[in-house]
Amino acid sequence: MCGRYYVDFDELPEAIAEEWGLDVHGAGTITMAGASDITPGTVAPALLRDGRGFVMKPMRWGFEGPEGGLVINARVETIREKPMYRAIQSGQRCVLPAFHYYEWRGGDRQKYEIGLTDRPMFFLAGLYRIGRQSTEFVVLTQPPLQPIMPIHNRMPLLLDSVPALKAWLDGGDARFLDEARLRIAASGPEQLQMML
């Protein structure tokens, strides 16, 4: 499950250009500033591939569900079978820049901040579609890697290299992350609850 992630918009252009070596057009259309937690229903930057390379576009997190509410995550193992994703699973892929994501442990609701040990930023794999009011995305999830298992039974599909990012955006399967690269830290005594 992924219900909240963090982006530092002031650091984002530099991280994408210098850390990832990506030339992204359209980044000027993202008018966000400062640092922010991205939560379901909010607008966040997403990267797509087009004829000129990579383009950044604002999208809203969550597909409007068939019975109302927001669908915010999709299991990577079942996107080819689920009617909601079948038509878009190969051609409408995106990636979401993130500096870390949050997870809450079942039982005591301890909050954890999860990132990478050797990169300040990574990308979450996603799917997008044109909704009634805006372009909307869901985050892909996978079974948890060993270090995440004590915290939650799902985790987002993290893309940690340019080849993995390109493979995902071009319709291929993403490589799974080496679990040794995960950085996990308990975050604060406040025991925050997820807001969906």
Image (spheres, rainbow, N blue to C red):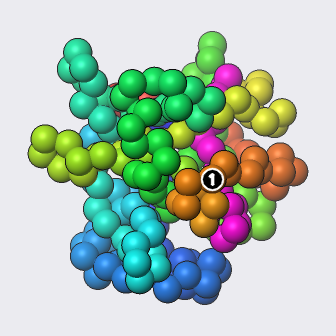
**x and y percent of residue 24 in the render?**
44, 81
- For label 1, the SS is loop
Closer to the camera, 58 or 186? Answer: 58
68 drawn magenta: no
Quadrant into which the N terminus falls: top right
| Mark 1 residue crowding within 10 angstroms, few (<14) / some (14–19) / many (20+) | few
Above or below 19: residue 103: above
Closer to the camera, 137 or 77? Answer: 77
**x and y percent of residue 29 in the render?**
25, 76
Please indicate, yes or no, whether residue 144 appears anywhere in the rendered image: yes
Residue under the image location 31 percent in, 66 percent down:
57
163 drawn magenta: yes
**x and y percent of residue 88 in the render?**
40, 43
Give the side of residue 101 with respect to residue 175, left or right: left
Residue under the image location 12 percent in, 45 percent down:
133
**x and y percent of residue 104 in the render?**
58, 29
Residue at the farthest left position: 133
Above or below 108: residue 40: below
Please indicate, yes or no, whether residue 187 appears anywhere in the rendered image: no
Which residue corresponds to mark 1?
Answer: 172
Give the side of residue 121 with respect to residue 135, left or right: right
Above or below 18: residue 79: above
Mark 1: which amino acid? Gly
Closer to the camera, 64 or 153? Answer: 64
Give the side of residue 20 with respect to residue 68, left or right: right
Residue under the image location 62 percent in, 18 percent down:
106
* Magenta stretch, residue numbers: 152-165
Quadrant into which the C terminus falls: top left
Q: How many marks?
A: 1
Residue under the image location 36 percent in, 62 percent down:
45
Residue at the farthest right position: 180
